[in-house]
Amino acid sequence: AFFRTTNTTIIITMAPLTTTSLTTLRSIRQYDPYLQQNLPPTPNNDTSTTSYQSNTEHVQFDTSGNITYLNLGGRRLRKLPSPISTFHPLEHLTTLNLGNSDLPPQIQMDILSSLKQHGTLRDLHLSGNGLRDAGITNLSAVLEDFESLEKLDLRYNDIGPAGATSLGTILNSSKNKLRILHVEGNELGDEGVTSLATVLCTNQTLMELYLGSNSIGPNGATSLSKCIEVNRTLSKLHLEGNCIGPNGAIAFAEVLERLKVEGGMRGLEKLYVDNNEMGKDAAKRLAKALNSDTAIEAVMEG
């Protein structure tokens, strides 16, 4: 692509798409009415590389015409005759959203396995796909040596304690480079969060962890507090909509107070704990321990 400016007008000319990009777009569009209307069409269904396309909310390209971003969230993909052969050629794909799609879990795993060898996928969204613990176990087998992945979205997948253990396998892998993990809206509970916290004590890659609405109580919060005492990488921890209560809040506060007195370094910068039934006294103590009026989101809810 090149950019040419004339006064205040910016003209952007896209490179022609590759044959792989065109073939993939045609294959996906023909099985979903919504995508037929919203995914960039190829003129007259032309498969030549002379067709030009612009980036949209569903697909984006690099300057050579390769698909780098593909958002198929909520789309009906089950009828794709060969999902693996559709996705496997995408050697430059960095972001893939298959969240809330109707692809069976095993097909999702097969697609990811076929993409792994390219070493380009960094951002993966699988929210709302009903993976459950069994699916997360299968996913961990695929992702534990997925070296390029930096962000993983697994919100609302009915994940329980066993699934949390499988997530720990991914985080504990020597090849893991995951920086952001979304697990909101599952059922990890205290048992699952304690399992994750054990792994996080030694993990040195994860920077943001989203655990909102996971039925986490005081015991789970205590496990996480012990983790932040030794973890220097995790900077954002989201616990909104759980039930850590006053005891969970105090557990965090005690660790942060101890680190402050001892002059120890800490990685945690932001702690989001609104809607956790902490009570005002515990919330105030936690806010003071973090030494910030803004680091705790809506901490004074009572």
Image (cartoon, rainbow, N blue to C red):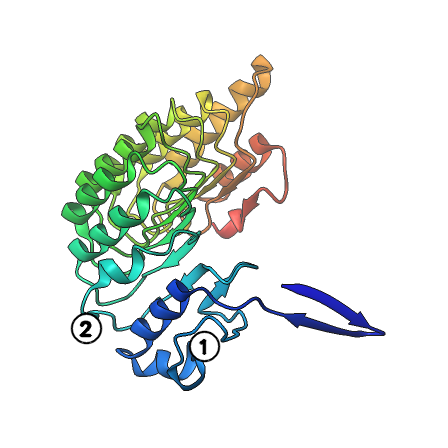
**Residue 84 as seen in the image, left or right of residue 98:** left
Q: Position of residue 249 (x, y in %)?
A: 43, 36
Which image quarter: residue 103?
Answer: bottom left
Front in this rendered view, residue 272 or 20: 20
Residue lying farthest to the bottom in this orientation: 44
Question: In this orientation, does residue 129 appear?
Answer: no
Which image quarter: residue 224?
Answer: top left
Q: Which mark is residue 79?
A: 2
Q: Give the residue type that dot 1 points to.
A: Pro
- The N terminus is located in which quarter? bottom right
Residue lying farthest to the top in this orientation: 262
Front in this rendered view, residue 291 or 158: 158
Q: Which residue is mark 1?
A: 40
Q: Does label 1 or label 2 sit earlier along the sequence?
A: 1
Which residue shows up at 28% across the image and 47% down it?
A: 215
**Residue 81 as seen in the image, left or right of residue 51:** left
Residue lying farthest to the right in this orientation: 7
